[in-house]
Image: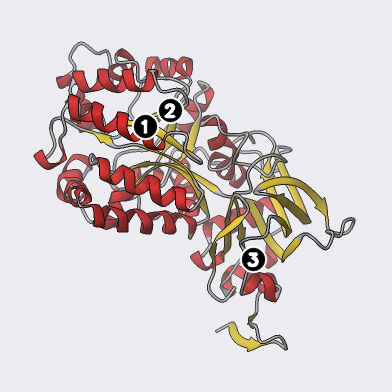
Amino acid sequence: MGREAEVDDMGCHRSRSFLPSASMSCMSARVIDSTARQVALRGDLLDFTAAPAPQDLNSTAVRWRPDHWLLIDHGRIEAALPASQFDPPPQWYRVEHPSRLIMPGFIDTHVHSAQIDVLGSWGTQLLDWLHTHTFPAEQRMAHPEHAQAISQMFVRALLAQGTTAACVFPSVHAVSADALFAAAHAQGMRMITGKVLMDRNAPAALCDTVEQARADCEALIARWHGTGRLAYAVTPRFAITSTPEQLALAGQLWARTPGSYLQTHVAENTDEAQWVAQLFPQARSYLDVYAQYGLLGERAVLAHGLWLDEHDHQVLADSGAQIAHCPSSNLFLGSGLLHWDTLAQSGIPVTLASDVGGGTSLAQRRTMLDAYKGQAMRMHKVSAFFLLHACTRGAAEALQLEHEIGSLEPGTLADVAVWDWASTETAHRRQQVARDLHERLFAWITAGDEADLVQTWVAGIPRHVRSGG
């Protein structure tokens, strides 16, 4: 109901819809020339020039440019010009999206590729869930064919949600990191990943040794770090599954690999935090374990951070490390609610992450909605602008990649997503009665459908195009 197929006089199938924003040119709906190096995208442009305040519904940090051309030259954004004042020259390949939303691609700062297999699994809390669901799925990544198939599926699935960059955990197997790097490189994506480090408190099939971890990481760094848009992340799973010797190795690898990242988990669950205290009695706190081994700094991405105290907040702020907030996973596993306002007041960067498979969807709009719900439970309402910034420009800045991704600034790579404002009759009605831009965006986040995504572009090349336009 609401959409019928028709054929125009050029033989191209179009969609006839109740939704005005669903109309588009034959060129953009059916076949896009992926070899074009000068591309003009027309639509309603939205990005951020700064960080909006959490509850500011009229923030001047929002850059809203309806009916503009976004000019992309050899993969980079050259300019954004009003369609009423500019007509692209004939050499520019035009893709027109009247009344559609064009935004930077989403950035997912914490997600597990191997856990596609356990998406939406029933379970108890974190530690039991890992042993019941996660570890069996990760053991299968030892097989090269499986690792390749899962990695390619995972990358396609990110693009199908408008996500163009991610920080990802594969598994402990070097082949799983190899496969993920290769899949992302084939799509031209910005990908930050590295083999997971675990040498205790996990199944034997998922444990390496300090010596094996060193050899695997050094080989992967030599092969992939800095290749295309790939960066290596030294990846101890969490303090529970690494010995002090392996954590020391992680700190050494990170320190001597310029441009690399450190990613791990911290203070997700109270039982987990108690176990860490037993394993590292000399540490003041869970976070202090990482501080003692040189695992905090400006390129450190720490997932969760729910159970940290005031002293930890100061240590985080001083280090420049970010917290990757995983609200869907935190709610699904019953881990707790993030004190986002407290972290922000302490000057700690907070980004948004799907955390699949603890999280239940790779869709960052669902992540944003769950973040809103979690903060609302704490009586701390946040705006659509605040949420969108956290998985676009805010995430890029936290990763020190704002020169490359996260906005529609000239000079950045054209990682962009094109969206319908609505693709169902009820969502369309909601858009019709929305009173301002914030209300439209908030409804787009909360009532959105996966069918809303029209195209995902990576460095100026279309990598996902919705079937039927």
Amino acid type assigned to the residue bearing label 2 in the image: Ser
Mark 1 Cα-neighbour bin, 10 Å: few <14, some 14–19, many ≥20 = some
Amino acid type assigned to the residue bearing label 3 in the image: Asp
Compare residues 92 and 275 and report the one nearer the observer.
92
Q: Is residue 215 left or right of residue 323?
A: left
Picture coordinates of residue 174, whole percent (x, y): 26, 40
Mark 1 and mark 3: Cα distance apart in space: 34 Å
**Residue at the spot x=44%, y=49% of the render?**
184
Residue matched to label 3: 33
Amino acid type assigned to the residue bearing label 1 in the image: Ile
- Quadrant location of the C terminus? bottom right
Query: Which mark is in front, 3 or 2?
Result: 3
**Residue at the spot x=45%, y=17% of the render?**
319
Residue at the far left: name it: 204
In the rendered image, which quarter is residue 21 located in? bottom right
Mark 2 Cα-neighbour bin, 10 Å: few <14, some 14–19, many ≥20 = many
**Residue at the spot x=69%, y=67% of the render?**
432
Residue matched to label 2: 260
**Residue at the spot x=72%, y=41% of the render?**
410
Q: Secondary structure at mark 1?
A: helix
Colouring of the image: secondary structure
Compare residues 147 and 454 and report the one nearer the observer.
147
